[in-house]
Amino acid sequence: MSAKEITVALVGNPNTGKSTLFNALTGLRQKVGNYPGVTVARKSGRCDCGDGLKVELVDLPGLYSLAAASPDEQVVTDVLLGSLEGSQQPDAIVVVLDATNLLRNLFLASQLAELNLPLALVLNQADIAHEQGLKIDTNLLSQRLGGVPVILTSAWKGEGIASVRRAIAEVLNKKTKMTRLTWPSQVESALNTIVQAIQTDTSIAPSNADAQRILFSSNAHTSDRLGWSQSQRISVIRQARDQVRAAGFNPLAAEPLIHYAHLRKVLEGVVSGGAGKQGNAAALDRVLLHRVMGPILFIGIMLGLFASVFWLAKFPMQWIQSGVDFLKAIIAPTLSSTPMLQSLVTDGIIAGVGAFLVFLPQILILFLFVGILEDSGYMARAAFIMDRLFSWCGLNGKSFVPLLSGYACAIPGLLSTRTIEDPKARLATAFAVPFMSCSARFPIYALMCAAFIGPLYGPGWESVVMVGMHCVGLIFAIPTAFVLTRFILKVKPQPFVLELPRYQMPKPRDVLWRMWQNAAEFISKAGTVIFAITIIIWALCYFPRDAQMAEKIKTAEPTLNTQELQARTQAAMIEQSWMGRFGKTIQPVFDPCGFDWKITVGVLASFPAREVIVSTLGVTYSIGKGAEADSQHLRLAMQDAKWTEGPRKSTPIFSLAAVLALMVFFALCSQCGPTIATLAQETGGWKWATISFFYMTILAWVMAVVVYQCVIRLT
Amino acid sequence: MTPLSQLLPGQFGKLVSLNPDRAVDQRLMALGLLPGMALKLVRRAPLGDPLAIEFGGQVVSLRLAEAESLIVDVAADCPVQRPKNNS
């Protein structure tokens, strides 16, 4: 963004169709980034306003008030005041309002007028207002507000977009500002008191809008930003608030009271008709929020969502997997003269790209669903239905979709925590998502159950263990969220005040575009980290290399056939690689869980992606690569495996205790590079990702020790 | 004078007072829920909490615990008994 470029901010309440308007105005020529230091997405795009005038249009998060209770709202306020580092104050503001509820929407516009910037009002969803029989006199409204352009649009239908472009050009040209309300004299003098005190104390001249934030908001953000010290401001603010009280207002209620009283007068005679006409929400809510039908329909919709993420995504995931294998098979022979390069390209680079591409189908499908649920208005109802189940542990109704998605895969689950407005609940939900038993944990459960639980205790117990394993994560995630929100996170909790908007048909372009933006952000941010981790683990398993290994094994055991020789060579190679050596060194740590060095290597090699455990066990148990959970060879090899030294010598390694401990370990351990990378991306830094990694891994180890030690004493 | 949390579904009235010190009430005021405003308890969620209230042409959900500080003057012609075959 060049310094000279003209920027225009798009501001409005949630559910006004602001994003649809933004997409229509920019025609998808958009950039998505982050505001510095916060996890609030910065969406901007080029908007052509005619006569060669091109402006940078910034789509700010939806908000109801500049009082800035949440970080999202804080960002909007900071951007508009021009006080956010790395972003300039916009040259003009376009306020998007819901034409069917002008009074409430004008409250934000009226606060924005105090910023004294050129401004235009877009009354969107005019088609729905028209259906409801509402007539809006835009000329009268414009006249009463100082001549600012007032445009009726229906962004959904693409109506009125050209007028918005012209209005932007007009306000930039004429610098039309919206008439500010006249504050009661005591309030005016209270604001002056604050402005003058700041000027004296900091020698910065604050704007009137700054003074209003300090006088009316209970948070200290603005004072802190202006560098107005606590000792200096306390008595001044108290004095100013006393002046407001003298006028008969509670200082924390004065702003909405005065604005709304002013706006009622502004709207007199502007809106007519519409009496008795209800929107579609009431009728649909009677069914969708019904005491019995509501939850049933909710479960149905969520099962549909889960089944799609889980099953539908399987096919494209298989295609990606076969594509990766196909590519490997093509490239491998061309590099056979240089085995190191061959392995780097196939097992490192191609596998690394495949490692994050394979998540794309699930991300795309989940965001398709989330987009439809959000844009249709159902997501708010889902949160309404589920809130009671989550509120006691500090989460909220919107935590449900991320947690459910986590059962398919943590990555889309983490990305969908963006729908949660409350930063505290968002972080706690993101922290809980990786505990959900994702599909990558399934192979190890399946292998252990098929090889040990089933044969020893019958298929009944096999299913019990399977179901139990899928609950282990949840059992630990809920208390974790409780402790996190109650005792650890210092962020102020947000009240769960949620608008239940009118139902609406989602616009395919908006849904698909947001789906793609989420996927693209995942690839560019998390993708690079995932790729790097894959390469590092490849190197640890590959080096150092003994070129004569195959020869040595052949000399020692000349009776082996080619396939056996290859498997034995692979096993020997990994045993003497850095990873193998590290596994042997660190095995004592896992000894109390009953893991031998081969399992330890499997556990360590699984940190970038837990599903590799089965194929790693295949290598360490000399079955060869590509072992599957249903591989008969692997099961037999594991059933035969015995301790070769120590107090447990010649007892089976895979006792019931060790099998259960291993499964519990995999249920809880943070063994997924992509999850850690995504967690860092979504929480705005490595702090929470690091805490999550160590917390889950240590918890997994402790619980594996507890399970092993208890079970071994009971059996 | 009844706290909003004790209203029955379908009951309506006028907001008498709220507590501007609380973040919830500040948010509701921004949405236009000010003393004197007519409001209606539309329904409770299937699990009893949160509540859906209607005022100024919009439906907003808020938690039972958050609805305590809102004092409502229930209109005299309101149904007092919860209707049997209605949610």
Image (spheres, rainbow, N blue to C red):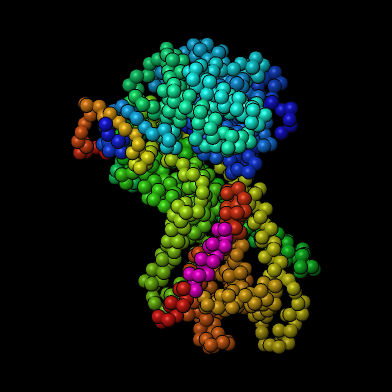
- Whether residue A401 is visible: no
* Image coords of residue A147 (percent x, y): 56, 13
* Image coords of residue A239 (percent x, y): 51, 28
* Image coords of residue A658 (percent x, y): 49, 77
- Magenta segment main secondary structure: helix
Q: Nearer the viewer, residue B19 or A186?
A: A186
In which image quadrant can residue A351 be found? bottom right
Magenta segment includes A704: yes
Quadrant in which the C terminus of chain A appears? bottom left
Magenta segment includes A26: no
Quadrant in which the N terminus of chain A appears? top right
In which image quadrant can residue A204 be found? top right
Residue A494 left/right relative to A328: left
State the extent of the magenta-drawn residues as a range.
A691-705
* Image point (67%, 53%), residue name: A528
* Image point (73%, 80%), residue name: A550
- Whether residue A453 is visible: yes
* Image point (71%, 28%), residue name: A5
* Image point (25%, 27%), residue name: B75
Above or below for A86 versus A387: above
